Amino acid sequence: MKKIVMLVIFMGHIATYTILAQEKNSDGKSLFGDMTARHIGPALMSGRINDLEVHPTNSRIIYAGAAGGGVWKSNDAGTTFNPIFDDYCQSIGAIALDPNDPDNTLYVGTGETWTRNSVSVGDGLYKSTDGGANWTKLGFDKSERIVNIVVNPKNSNEIYVGVLGALWGDSDERGVYKSKDAGVTWEKLLYVDPKTGCADLAMDPNDPNVLYASMWEFRRTGWGFESGGENSALYKSTDGGFSWNKIHNGFPTGKLGRLGIAVAPSNPNVLYTVIEAEKDERKGLYRSDDAGNSWKQLNNDFGITVRPFYFSRIVVDPKDENVVVKGGLSGSISRDGGKTFKNLGNMHSDIHDIAFSIKDSDIMFVGTDGGVYRSWDGGTNMEIVENLPLSQFYHISVDNESPYNVYGGLQDNGSWYGPSSSPGGVEARDWNSVGFGDGFRVLKHPTKNIIYSEMQGAENVWRFDVDRSLIKTIQPLPSKGIGKLRFNWNAPMAISEHQPDRFYMGSQFLHKSEDMGDTWTIISPDLTTNDPSKQTQENSGGLSKDNSGAENHTTIFTIAESPLDENVIWVGTDDGNVQVTQDGGKTWTNTVGNISGLPKNTWTYHIEASVFDKGTAYAVFEGHTQNDMNPYTYKTTDFGKTWTSIITDDIVGFVRNIQEDHVNPDLLFLGTEFGLYITTDGGKNWKKFTNNMPSVAVHFIDLQKETNDLVMGTHGRGVIIIDDISPLREINDEVLDKNVHFFASKPTVINEKSNFSGSFGTETQFVGRNKTTDAQIKYYLKKRHTFGKMKMEIQDLEGNTIFELGPGKSKGINIVNWAGKIKQPKVAKGKTFSFGGFTSPTVPAGNYKAVMTKGKETFEHIFELVYDEKSRLTPEEREFKNQTTMKMYDMTQELAYLVYELDEMSAAAERDGNSKIVAKLQDLKKTLVITTGDNYVGSAEPQLREKMADLYSKLANSYDKPTKSEIENLEVISERFETAKSDFMKLKKRFKTKEGFAVKTFEEFLESN
């Protein structure tokens, strides 16, 4: 019996320990608390749009589904947009509104459908019944790409979904599905085989039993693409999807590729399809005037037939069946039923979707690789929507400027750099172009104002001398005896931390330059598998050849020189090798065979060389191009002889990048296809970071060493920054078990900078939020504070209260900001505002205490404020500035109290009917404050209060010591104030009332509202 009791107690301890451990490690939101990501864009180059939908009855409401940036809603006809889907997969395939309840019921199908090599993946179908505020998942977890959602306009319970399915492998979750219960259950209506998915789906607007579906046979690999086959076809159903028939009368013979389908809303007998066929002359736009019974080819222009896998969308004007628009490089519009086309107006290339306004067909919305555009004149002229920060970064890096700059390359939008903070916020004009085409790696020279950038496949690698505006191409070129160089579409570049002019690039070989790219040396053999079966890109595309270079394979993809030893270099390849040299390239060892549990040839996406030990490195592998969506990340401590997985079940989505902290080796950051994960224990437990951080694909992470900012390049939401991750370095079991723990902080530089920035021209633009310049008190609470008093004061080291703050009470990390200022002075009441009195003076540099009272307990944290090292003021000048400012501060409050007393006396005299003394008091008051007009009066003569407050604000807001003129003005004001006080005291001594009256003390007055 005793044994049983002890066993029960023991098991109880285990259960308690397990629960505590789960509480510590399960919920990232409760740990990260107030740590919040901020977005800096950019939006001027925006990003790829997959789908556009217009509200069927309200022309002001428009939805945009981004390729990697989520769902955005506009309530002002496309002038501005706001995100409504941030907590879910950000790769969007289709959006649909229930035509019977368009204000509330929305559907979102995830997974981009324009199947280029860099597309993300979806995770199913979602529904909202409250206009996008909340979402419920309806299944299709492994659909990967949903192309269409159609709701029966006569029955909201009847929904059709077209599933394109997996891009990189076989999948049974493809075809056309139907629900009869608003998405609760689904029936597969049309299915061909595991390689053929639904590429387009449409419904007859007059007869919901008539459906059209295009089925497309396709497959992409890491080294090629195949579009088309025997199973591609266009189908029609007249019984709500129960049965289907091919409608190919007039179609080309042979294999077909991707087909688009559109039904003219104004005349459903008119159909348009665009066909990818075996023979070039048979490709193009076809039209049917008899609901698909027969077809006629109308147009074979290049703009119609180009890249059908990427451009197959057809949209018909809802009011005119002869106005049809086709996606393409520029977008094409026909006004004669498809016979002739002209390009749409000037905008970003690569047009994926078009939507007409419901009221006026001259108003059009166009989704491109560079965002959303609007036209007011039928597509002749286009204007970009300026507040969609959907930029798709492949790679980012940072420099050591203050504020630091972020560098990166974008999908189809070149290469750029911009500041992490900027006066007024990070605006479009803050970003600078440093490359064309698809941009990838962008690196700043460590000691010179030189930037390296590249475009696709190392077609161009630029060295840009910023100061002299000089550009030179420096990519390694084939030389005698070397032959063809194989560069990845996203060719790797790296700068040495040991020799600043040393520059690396990878083809199948590792290239090294000691003179910034002027001369190159190959320091390795072919480090790839050199598999010839994966080097046939000239045949890529299937029915439409598509050899852009994006499918280049058996190439080096990542390079990492050890920051501790220049002779240790790691190289990872897209065909799965992990190579290391310990002698600067003389000999190489392929260590991938030492990794257990990793499928063969899995893409080595990133290698991170440790800053703590030269034998330690992290390798990230990405297998989705082999239809493997599992996460893979490994760590070695012995130059690759052995590897250990650091992936746990906490992580959802395949991994693209890892960043090691520079201070705590157990603090790691993992960029996945569905967001950011963080571990504080070396990979034993991971938590997803979701505070203003969408579930977006994080392609690259960098850590700015001076600021401790985590900087992420996302493929759909631009640059996202988590400011100062240093508190996470202290997270361990000891800290997690403390009721309260204050985190250490670097001294805060007192911000004395100012500028003339404004918001002119940014009313409809995205503006990135700046990093705060406030002092931040950061602490961890083991539990949320719910009962009892809790307050926080800022005190000097003698215990004098300087400022009171509202403390955070949430479980996890709390952050309280203090601007380093005391309260605004109490200002005398007058008819108008005294705007100068709204200034709060800055405290002197030095040590201060944050004192937090939590119930009966008190906790203290000392932190430091320092002056900018670049300040030219001497300590004596600083002291004089502070003394003068506080003299004016005190004087302002003294005047406020004097006017308060005067008003109380005047009120008492009025009660007594003593008009004579009232008049004298009011005459004096008129010399102290403005007593007429309103807050916009410009003609009222400033009185003592205005002159005093204005001088005070000038002194308090200045970075410099008081000028001679200001000191002289202070003397004038002081003399006038002394006279006023004297005049008031004379009236006060003679003042008597019938009933007597009492006034607050000076201290009571200052504490009052």
Image: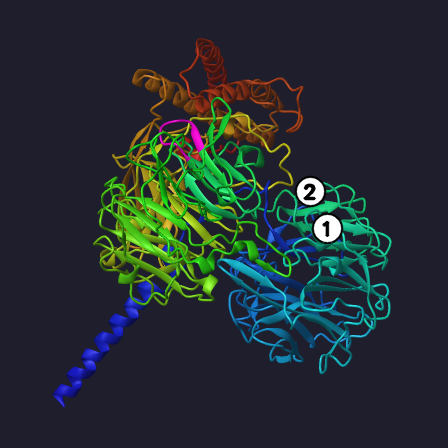
Say few, some or many: other residues with alpha carbon within 10 Å of mark 2 (under 14 / 14 to 19 / 20 or more): many
Residue 136 image offset from top left, x and y in percent: 56, 69
Q: Residue furthest front?
A: 481
Label 1: which secondary element: helix
Give the residue displayed 49% in from the left and 13% down from the top. 976
The nearer-to-camera label among 2 and 1 is: 1
Location of mark 1 (residue): 302
Observer-nearest of 321 and 952: 321
**Residue lying at 33% horizontally and 47% vertically, measured from the top left:** 525
Q: Secondary structure at mark 2?
A: loop
Magenta stretch, main secondary structure, is loop
In the rendered image, residue 507, in percent from the top left (x then y), is placed at 41, 46
Name the amino acid type tagged 1: Phe
Whether residue 344 is visible to the viewer of this picture, yes or no, is yes
Left or right: where 878 falls relative to 96: left
Picture coordinates of residue 80 (x, y %)?
65, 47
Q: Is residue 202 above or below residue 516?
A: below
As for residue 449 lying within the magenta part, the answer is yes
